[in-house]
Amino acid sequence: MITATNATKHFGTLTAVDHVCAEIRNGSVFGLIGSNGAGKSTFLRMLAGILQPDEGNVTIDGAEVYENIPVKERCFFISDEQFFFPNCTPWEMKNYYQTCYERFDEPRFHKLMKGFGLDEHRKIRTFSKGMKKQVSVICGICATTDYLFCDETFDGLDPVVRQTVKSLFAEAVEDRGMTPVIASHNLRELEDICDHVGLLHRGGILFSRDLDEMKLGMFKMQCIFQEQLPADAWGSFDVLRLEQRGSLYTLTARGNREELQRRVAEMNPTFFELLPLTLEEIFISETEVAGYDIKKLLF
């Protein structure tokens, strides 16, 4: 398990990560979201042992990560800014990673390179941004590490490749319990893969929630009424968010599904339906309750 306790990182007068506390369970897919400059990349680099916290600590299974080679051998970091040795090929990078990761899966590397349509012997500097990210992902998967840290990994990938990469992550989680930590500024990128999400803002984590727990007892409803409802019509509901456009009411509320349906039915709507909540809608509701506007935090 990854544990960050009051992890803090300064760059001169800038506090990039500010007393972050977080726990990331083994085998979970943790999404780290936040706007540009929120501290996501710095936090990932501390998790990977690239940066040392100025205050607090970051541990994996109770052991400090920084300058701890046995622990770092269990981690692979995919940077937002791709780095490869000058004039190297994917085949040469594979040879290098084999010296760092004793469990590196060479047959799988060749299979994935072929599957993605990438030439192992072509200079990586001639690849596009998306192709370079594909090489990084393939190396990260084939390193067969326990932890995979991904910084804006889906940015620049076309939709088909993006879904393929997500499938590879899900397969590794299922087959060998890999724990991916994926940083992104886009909630929609994480919605179909993460089971736990943390919101990072101005260097600190505002929320860290299990998605199943967040969705439990939270529903989005749309209702239409023939007549205008009184101002206190929803007073007895635990409403997290309410919008009205003419006779259409859209609200997010907590409660038992059957009970909510019964109580709305008693109000005699001409139209009523329950809709699935998106990850963005869940976070909008949670952050607004806490006094934040997630749209200002992320967009």
Image (cartoon, rainbow, N blue to C red):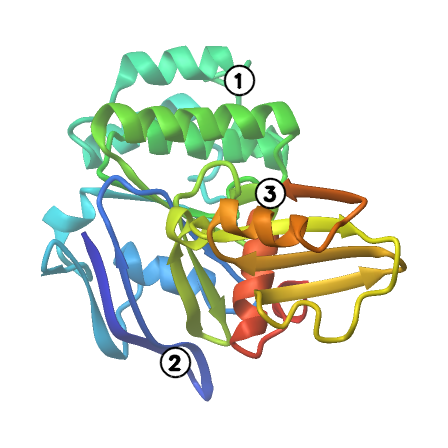
* Mark number displayed over residue 265: none
| Labels 3 and 2 touching (C-beta < 8 A) | no
Where does the image place residue 117, in percent across and percent down from the top left? 55, 13
Q: CA distance from mark 2 to mark 1?
A: 39 Å
Q: Give the spatial CA distance, label 3 vs label 2.
A: 27 Å
Q: Which residue is mark 2?
A: 10
Residue placed at 56% from the left, 30% from the top?
A: 162
Quick one: label 3 or label 1, which is nearer the N terminus? Answer: 1
Classify residue 158 as left or right of residue 73.
Answer: right
Name the quadrant containing residue 85: top left
Q: Are there few (<14), some (14-19), or many (20+) residues within 10 Å of tag 2? A: some
Please name the amino acid that badge 2 sits on. Answer: His
Q: Is 176 displayed left or right of 250 in the figure? A: left
Residue 193 % position (x, y): 46, 37
Residue 155: name its quadrant. top right
Q: Of label 3 and label 2, which has the lower sequence position?
A: 2
**Amino acid under disc 3:** Asp
- Determine crowd level at label 1: few under 14, some 14-19, many 20+ residues with C-alpha closer than 10 A: some
Q: Nearer the viewer, mark 2 or mark 1?
A: 2
Amino acid residing under circle 1: Leu
In the rendered image, which residue does mark 1 sit on?
118
Of mark 2 and mark 1, the one earlier in the sequence is: 2
Under circle 3, the secondary element is loop
The residue positioned 23% from the left and 36% from the top of the image is 145
Nearer to the camera, 240 or 297: 240
Numbered label attached to residue 155: 3
Look at the image and tell me whether residue 35 can be seen. no
Element carrying mark 1: loop
